Amino acid sequence: MSFTDDLPIGNDPVAIRRRIEAMEMLLERSFTVPGINRPVGLDAIVGLVPVVGDFIAMGLGAYIVWEARNLGMPKWKLMRMAGNVAFDSAVGAIPVAGDLFDFMFRSNTRNLKIVKKHLDKHHPESRLIEQ
């Protein structure tokens, strides 16, 4: 999926899945760092800005949890996802060590996996075959 694709605006499972996948890609895998061949995204980059960057990254991660809530996911899954975002934000707020941690712990990717597993079980029609 590229950022130029038109994202759907509906509340159906397919539209929500596409928006969550696009947000995860933006936050975790926007580009590859030359030399280390490690994909990074807006989450790690914005997290380099002290305090404000961590709040922005937390808000963007919370968007994925909000979209999951729109799917009607169980509260325990939403709490797990919120915990991933909170843990990432708390540790990411530590100067230097937190910035390194942001490159390794990908809360948004973890949350995408939770959403995909839920959708594959409860809304199998939302699966997209990638080419």
Image: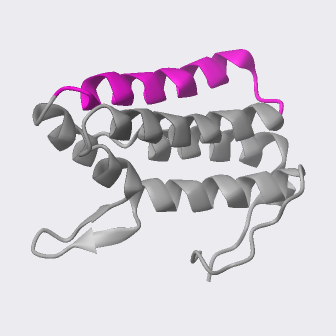
Chief secondary structure of the magenta span? helix
The image quadrant that residue 114 belongs to is top right
Number of numbered discs: 0
Asked if residue 127 is positioned above or below residue 35 in the image, the reply reads above
The image quadrant that residue 8 belongs to is bottom right
The image quadrant that residue 37 belongs to is bottom left
Position of residue 98 in the picture relative to residue 63 (left or right)? left
Asked if residue 46 is positioned above or below residue 67 in the image, the reply reads below
**Which quadrant is home to the C terminus?**
bottom right
The type of colouring in the image is one colour
- In the image, residue 84 lies at what x, y percent? 45, 27
- In the image, residue 41 lies at what x, y percent? 37, 59
For the point 24% across and 48% down, the residue is 103
Residue 93 located within the stretch drawn in magenta: yes
> Which stretch is magenta?
72-94
- In the image, residue 34 lies at what x, y percent? 16, 76
- In the image, residue 112 lies at what x, y percent? 57, 46
